[in-house]
Structure formats: structure tokens, C-alpha cells
Amino acid sequence: MELVKPSTVHVPSYVAALERAWLPDHLDKESTQYELDWIRRDPIEFLRLTDNPEGQGPDLRLPDGSRGPRLPSITRWMWDGEFCGRIQLRWQHGTTELPPSCLGHIGYAVVPWKRRRGFASLALSLILDDAIAVGLSYVDLTTNQDNLVSQRVIEKTRGQLIERFKKPDAFGGAPSYRFRIHLSDAVSPLG
């Protein structure tokens, strides 16, 4: 598995995953149709705003349908010859702080038919180099308290639990954990 920058070459495989009912955002049951419609309407704009280190474009649609500011972001698709999942790094220039509309610096998801292969762990390890390159000293990640698999992925990359909290209603309101990975402590993808 490798991380690839989303491009027109990769879009058909991404669309195929969406058509298999993969949810790009597990909190937003409409996210699959939203992205399919967007890709069909304007695939170039979809790609431009998917990997968007300048944070350009309109506000983002949050899981509850409300809007939040679009942040600079780097999105990579997990790829093993076809789409396996995605990982995204988000930040604000000049600070490690995030607005309330963004719960963590990194979010990831693996399609169900590619899980249990170590793709999330490898992708998380690999994207940490990008976090260092944009000037972050640490990254925060959040997960629901009942998502033990994601917690293991984060802990494997030396993420430390720093907070128990309830997600805002816009994000489903679930009891959650916030983990922090200090980039000087992160585990290399090679071991």
C-alpha cells in the first residue's frame, strides 16, 4: 500500500468505492451521495478542493449539514492498485490550534473490504512527515470511545490519550477520546 495524491487516474476507483456504499464520513450518512454528485458535476473542482494545502474554496459541510471554515489540508488516498481508503491532514498556518469545527489534525478511513491489513497504521505513519513539513510539532486525533481499532492504530504510532470528551452535536455527540502524537516521538513506517 502507498499513499497517492488524488488524481483523475484514481477517481474511477474512488467512485467504485463510493458506489459500493463506502461512507467517506461515517458520521454523515449522506456523504457518499454528496461526493458522487460532486464528482459527476465537477471532478476537477472535487480534486482541487480534496487536496488543498492553501485552504481555498467555500466552507465545508459538517456531518449535521452545518458549515465550518475550510482549512488547509493534504489528502492522500491509500492505494494498492485500487482505492483502499483515505487520510487527511488539516491545520491552520502558524499554529497547532484548530477551530471548533475541526476535531483533529488527522482523519482517516479504510474501506471495509480492505481492513485488517495494516493500511491505517501505515498511512498514519506516512502522513506524519507532511505534518512536520507544514510546521506542526504535534497532531491531535479523535476517536469514539467504542472505536478500539482506531485507538490501537493511534497508539501504535505513539499517540497518547490526552482527553476524554463528548463530541459536539454537529459531530454526533458521542463520548470520545483525543489523542496526541508528538512528532518527535512518532514511529517510523519502517518500524
Image: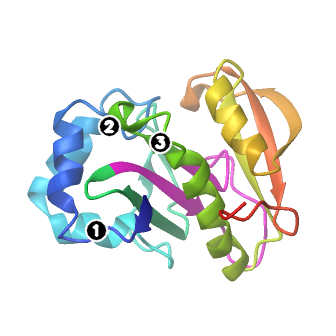
Query: Secondary structure beneath disc 1?
Result: helix
Q: Which residue is more in the foreground, 58 or 97?
A: 97
Colouring? rainbow
For the C terminus, give its image quadrant.
bottom right
**Mark found first going from the N terminus, 1 or 3:** 1
Residue at position x 28%, y 68% in the image: 47
**Mark found first going from the N terminus, 1 or 2:** 2
Q: Which residue is mark 2?
A: 31
**190 with respect to 139 (left or right):** left
**Disc 1 to disc 2, C-alpha distance:** 16 Å
> Which residue type carries mark 2?
Ser
Q: Which residue is mark 1?
A: 47
Tell me whether circle 1 and circle 2 mark residues in contact (CB < 8 Å).
Answer: no
**Disc 3 to disc 2, C-alpha distance:** 13 Å
- Name which quarter of the figure residue 184 lies in: bottom right
Q: Nearer the viewer, mark 1 or mark 3?
A: 3
Q: How would you rate the neighbour count of disc 2 (Cα within 10 Å): few for under 14, some for 14-19, many for 20 or more?
A: many
Residue 55 at what x, y percent from top left?
49, 72
Residue 146 at what x, y percent from top left?
67, 18
Q: Is residue 131 above or below residue 105?
A: below
Q: Nearer the viewer, mark 3 or mark 2?
A: 3
In the image, farthest residue toward the left: 40
Q: Which residue is more in the foreground, 37 or 161?
A: 161
Q: Which residue is mark 3?
A: 109
> Which residue type carries mark 3?
Ala
Q: Is residue 65 magenta?
A: no
- Which numbered marker is on residue 75? none
Question: Which stretch is magenta?
Answer: 84-107
Q: Is residue 12 above or below residue 169?
A: below
Q: Is residue 83 above or below residue 138?
A: above
